[in-house]
Image (cartoon, rainbow, N blue to C red):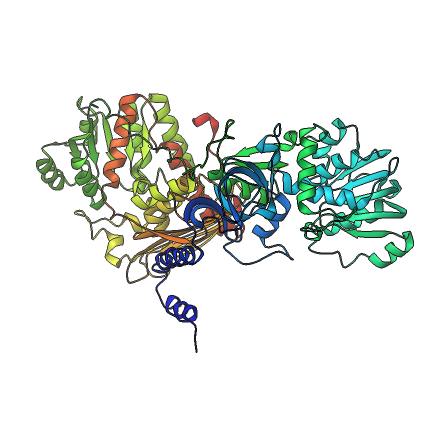
């Protein structure tokens, strides 16, 4: 017959994914209270570092039982990270626990908050150290704690269990005065082992590390340092070798350093062995004695002259600190707030961390006498961004809209809604359309483009004209001192792009290209998430944009004035590339901050009455080394599709018009790491309006707008290089923006 737990598990597994977290919380809430009632214990809140999954660390609120009869509740002040052990578990190295969630940490110090009814020798307010998790408070057995003597800081005492690991290894080594000692591995346990070994008066100590990065401590203590790359390891001939790293390489190195008949003490947690090494032959050849000295071999109670108990080793370690015969404060290289735990473990997991001793500071060490019972400290409130006061009144930008096809009409509607835009003139070669729109906007209808440019009340022109007219009309406007707001693309060729950017610069007018998709809610949210580190270092990008354009579209069926310029390669320059995909390229650049360095493209005209592309697929390498694909087309019937996936060292974003799905190893906006969270997106609206307002504010403040000619130039450089790559049948480097144009 199934147990209650099995029945609940079966029900839980059938529940939707978005319901399961709430069920888990409810189950924990009920189960811990049932356990508390049975044990006659209290329920206490705390915050605890938790490994949620591989390479996912999180500081989360928890509830723990108050002390049972034989237990003590400790209000934590400092906990020390064990880099090797904790990183191995987090990354899932062989020989480590692979069940999550996992509560890391086994060495810390704090103040006794509560004691169980049967506890003797400890009272609230005592300073204690020992086997404690990374948590704001922890309930543990008295057997893993010792009192911290006066004169020893809780920061130093937080290394107690690490000290016990090193101390019991040195004890088993039985170093005699005058013997030669080598310590392999210069992490925390290696540094402690080296300094504890020095107390036995050896003739020499050789510290051996993977590189010379940690040589300074050994040299400052008067010891010799050698790296694995140095010649002469075989000639060290140490009487005692303490292996303190636990890797296959370090164990092999320890055997190389040992003299004939010497003792090799394995202190590190050796989870794997190098199967290629001939261990037996080496041991027999040198007549070596191997001594296991893992923490699990330490006696709990009974002891002997060579095998002290945990309590004895811990008390001796603290006494050595009190007498200043041992120093540990200089081993601390990072004092981290618990809220930064994700950053701490990211650095450790990357393998690039240069830190030696890392501690979490949970609360200040209490003054003497300490308070009786501290309460669990909550995480500080996240810094709130206070909105800046409303800007002083900005004079509207008076614009003339040129080109009143379907896009020009859309721009006119958006401009009419923009708070900082005043449409004062319009112009189109179809004068009937021009007069009708002008009347609806209370603007003037110009007889010609020159006439519009000569109007003194026009500050800027918004050009929504065919691609082949961009250069000439933009340069003409700049020469008249009018700011240029230009529909994408910037131009058809890179030469034309150079001329437009240089011309606007020469005449001192602002140039902005309509890449207003940057103002879409999903794009802004995606950029914020990436800026907050949701994906870490970006390693991959996928973007897809598919739609359907009927045959009449290419001949201007959607415009008031029919025109087939879109079908001409000479007049349009490109098809779907310039119609839609340029927006995707731009906001990928905007969201990620990356730029393509190499591209290769395949494109074709597979279903449209045109000379230009209607289907595109690009492979690209970005400037940080990431690899991406961007594809799209306008011949796919059905609902439009726009989706981007951006992933990196710490997470993935999946973006579409309805939602962003975030899976991150980091706690972003308070969300639980290691889980997929869905953020709904508000409907698309007002993105052109926002672009126009931003340009206006920038012009009035005398600064560059968010989207300048540079963005248009870089976008065109991507597209023209991609088109050329297919013609040449090879990938090509994307040119960088010339400094002379800045």
Q: Is residue 646 visible?
A: no
| Left or right of residue 742, residue 237 in this image | right
Instruction: Using the rendered view, name the quadrant where residue 710 is placed.
Output: top left
Q: Number of labelled discs? A: 0
Compared with 4, 144 (above or below) is above
Q: Is residue 13 visible?
A: yes
Residue shown at 28% from the left, 27% from the top: 388
The residue at 71%/51% (across/down) is 302
Q: Quadrant of the N terminus?
A: bottom left
Where 494 falls versus 616 (above or below)?
Answer: above
Looking at the rendering, which quadrant does residue 616 occupy?
Answer: bottom left
| Residue 133 drawn at (x, y percent) | 54, 46
Q: Quadrant of the C terminus?
A: top left
Q: Residue at x 43, y 75 (%)?
A: 2
Camera-side residue of 586 and 73: 73
- Residue 22 % position (x, y): 35, 57
Q: Is residue 295 left or right of residue 53?
A: right
Q: Nearer the viewer, residue 385 or 559?
A: 385
Task: Give x and y (percent) for residue 684.
Answer: 25, 47
**Which percent across, then down, holds residue 458?**
19, 25
Say above or below: 453 vs 497.
above
Q: Quadrant for residue 205, please give it.
A: top right
Residue under the point 19% across and 48% down: 559
Give the side of residue 82 with respect to residue 279, left or right. left
Residue nearest the viewer, comparing 101 with 664: 101
């Amino acid at each position: 017959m199934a147990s209650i737990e099995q029945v609940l598990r079966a029900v839980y597994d059938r529940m939707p994914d978005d319901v399961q977290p709430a069920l888990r919380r409810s189950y924990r809430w009920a189960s811990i209270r049932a356990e508390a009632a049975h044990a006659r214990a209290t329920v206490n809140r705390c915050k605890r570092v938790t490994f949620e999954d591989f390479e996912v660390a999180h500081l989360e609120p928890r509830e723990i039982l108050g002390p049972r009869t034989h237990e003590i509740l400790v209000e934590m002040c400092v906990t020390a990270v064990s880099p090797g052990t904790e990183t191995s578990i987090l990354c899932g190295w062989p020989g480590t626990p692979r069940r999550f969630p996992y509560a890391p940490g086994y060495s810390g110090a704090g103040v006794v908050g509560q004691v169980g009814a049967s506890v003797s020798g400890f009272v609230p307010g005592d300073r204690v150290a020992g086997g404690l998790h990374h948590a704001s408070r922890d309930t543990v057995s008295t057997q893993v704690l010792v009192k911290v003597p006066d004169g020893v800081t809780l920061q130093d005492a937080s290394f107690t269990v690490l000290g016990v690991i090193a101390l019991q290894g040195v004890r088993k080594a039985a170093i005699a005065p005058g013997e030669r000692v080598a310590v392999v591995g210069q992490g925390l346990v290696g540094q402690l082992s080296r300094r504890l070994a020095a107390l036995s008066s050896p003739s020499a100590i050789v510290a051996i590390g993977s590189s010379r990065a940690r040589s300074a401590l050994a040299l400052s203590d008067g010891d010799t340092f050698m790296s694995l790359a140095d010649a002469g390891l075989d000639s060290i001939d140490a009487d005692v070798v303490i292996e303190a790293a636990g890797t296959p390489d370090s164990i092999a190195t320890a055997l190389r350093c040992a003299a004939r008949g010497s003792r090799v003490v394995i202190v590190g947690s050796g989870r794997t062995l190098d199967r290629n090494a001939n261990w037996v032959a080496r041991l027999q050849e040198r007549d070596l004695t191997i001594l296991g000295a893992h923490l699990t071999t330490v006696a709990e109670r009974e002891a002997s002259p060579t095998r002290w108990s945990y309590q004895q080793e811990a008390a001796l370690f603290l006494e050595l600190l009190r007498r200043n015969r041992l120093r540990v404060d200089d081993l601390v290289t990072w004092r981290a707030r618990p809220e930064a735990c994700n950053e701490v473990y990211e650095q450790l997991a990357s393998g690039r961390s240069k830190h030696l001793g890392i501690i979490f500071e949970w609360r200040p060490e209490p003054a003497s006498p300490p308070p009786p019972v501290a309460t669990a400290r909550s995480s500080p409130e996240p810094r709130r961004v206070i909105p800046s006061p409303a800007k002083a009144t900005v004079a509207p930008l008076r614009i003339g809209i040129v080109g009143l096809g379907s896009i020009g009409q859309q721009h006119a509607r958006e401009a009419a809604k923009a708070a900082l835009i005043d449409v004062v003139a319009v112009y189109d070669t179809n004068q009937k359309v021009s007069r009708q729109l002008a009347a609806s906007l209370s603007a003037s209808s110009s007889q010609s483009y020159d006439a519009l440019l000569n109007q003194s009340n026009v500050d800027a022109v918004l050009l929504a004209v065919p691609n082949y007219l961009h250069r000439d009309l933009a340069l003409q406007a700049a020469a008249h001192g009018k700011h240029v707001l230009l529909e994408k693309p910037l131009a058809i060729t890179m030469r034309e792009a150079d001329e437009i950017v240089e011309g606007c610069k020469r005449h001192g007018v602002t140039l902005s290209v309509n890449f207003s998709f940057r103002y879409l809610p999903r794009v802004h949210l995606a950029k914020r998430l990436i800026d907050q580190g949701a994906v870490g270092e970006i390693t991959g990008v996928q973007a897809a944009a598919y739609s359907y354009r009927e045959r009449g579209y290419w001949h201007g069926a959607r415009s008031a004035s029919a025109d087939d310029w879109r079908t001409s390669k000479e007049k349009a320059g490109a098809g779907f590339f310039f119609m839609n995909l340029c927006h995707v390229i731009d906001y990928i650049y905007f969201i990620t901050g990356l730029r393509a360095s190499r591209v290769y493209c395949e494109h074709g005209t597979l279903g449209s009455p045109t000379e230009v592309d209607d289907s595109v697929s690009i492979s690209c390498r970005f400037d940080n080394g990431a690899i991406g694909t961007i594809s799209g087309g306008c011949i796919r019937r059905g609902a439009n599709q726009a989706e981007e996936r951006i992933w990196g060292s710490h997470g993935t974003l999946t973006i579409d018009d309805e939602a962003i799905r975030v899976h991150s190893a980091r706690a972003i906006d308070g969300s639980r790491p290691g889980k997929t969270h869905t953020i709904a997106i508000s409907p698309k609206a007002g993105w052109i309006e926002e672009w126009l307002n931003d340009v206006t504010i920038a012009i009035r403040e005398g600064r560059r707008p968010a989207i300048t000619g540079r963005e248009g130039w870089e976008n065109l450089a991507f597209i023209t290089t991609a088109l050329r790559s297919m013609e040449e049948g090879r990938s090509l480097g994307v040119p960088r923006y010339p400094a002379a144009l800045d």
